[in-house]
Image (cartoon, rainbow, N blue to C red):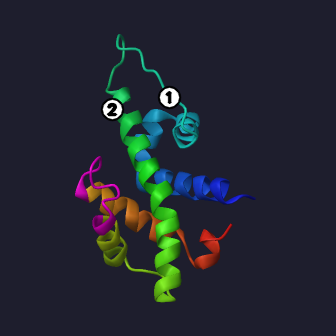
Amino acid sequence: MDQAKDNKDLARRVLLDSFPQECAAAGPSSVDDVLNGVDIVVPEEGRPFPLHEIFQFLKDVAEFLLVLIPLVKVLWAMYKRKPTAAEVEAETKKRGVGHGKLKPEQVEKAIKGLLKGIRDIEDLAG
């Protein structure tokens, strides 16, 4: 399996586990589309709730996770252990990753969801 596919699979699991309501509203195939960079067009008329905003949110979280996964791998190698959520968040702030599009609580939730979803460095290896 290649690294990009592994990262997308891990990001998908984190999205589904950490943001279940948003993923349910979008639908499983839409979550895959978001991770694969497919532009999703939502008709303006007849929609009962803000699907466009949900898709945009999922896209922003997915992009953040796909940058976060290799960063966590680097931090793990640097610390020779699984980094803490605080260490990962500090590094994302330092690098300006994810803090423009996502609210602080969403960044925290994504980081904690990712760290919860990985048991050891092998979960990040490709």
Name the residue located 38 percent from the left edge and 28 percent from the top edge: 51
Using the image as rendered, state which of residue 57 and residue 22 is in the foreground. 57
Q: Which mark is residue 39?
A: 1
Task: Indicate the quadrant where residue 58 lies.
Answer: top left
Nearer the N terminus, badge 2 or badge 1?
Answer: 1
Q: Residue at x 38, y 36 (%)?
A: 56
What is the magenta segment's predominant secondary structure? loop
Name the spot of residue 67 as percent of width and height, x first.
47, 58
Q: Is residue 96 magenta?
A: yes
Q: Quadrant of the N terminus?
A: bottom right
Residues marked 2 and 1 touching at CB (< 8 Å) = no
The kind of residue tagged 1 is: Asp
Q: Which residues are magenta?
A: 93-104
Q: Which residue appears farthest toward the left when viewing the image?
A: 104
Considering only vertical position in the picture, is 120 above or below 17?
A: below
Q: Is residue 122 visible?
A: yes
- Dividing the picture into quadrants, the one containing residue 95 is bottom left
Q: What percent of the width, then of the height, locates residue 117?
A: 52, 67
Tag in front: 2 or 1: 1
Please identify the residue farthest to the bottom as the structure is shown: 80
Residue type, mark 2 in image: Glu
Relative vertical location of residue 4 with respect to residue 53 in this rendering, above or below: below
Tell me what residue is drawn at x 42 percent, y 54 percent.
Answer: 64
The label on residue 50 is none
The residue that mark 2 highlights is 53
Helix, strand or loop status at disc 2: helix
Asked if residue 17 shows in the view, the reply is no
- Is 114 left or right of 50, judged from the image as shown? right
Residue 25, horizontal then vertical, whole percent: 43, 35
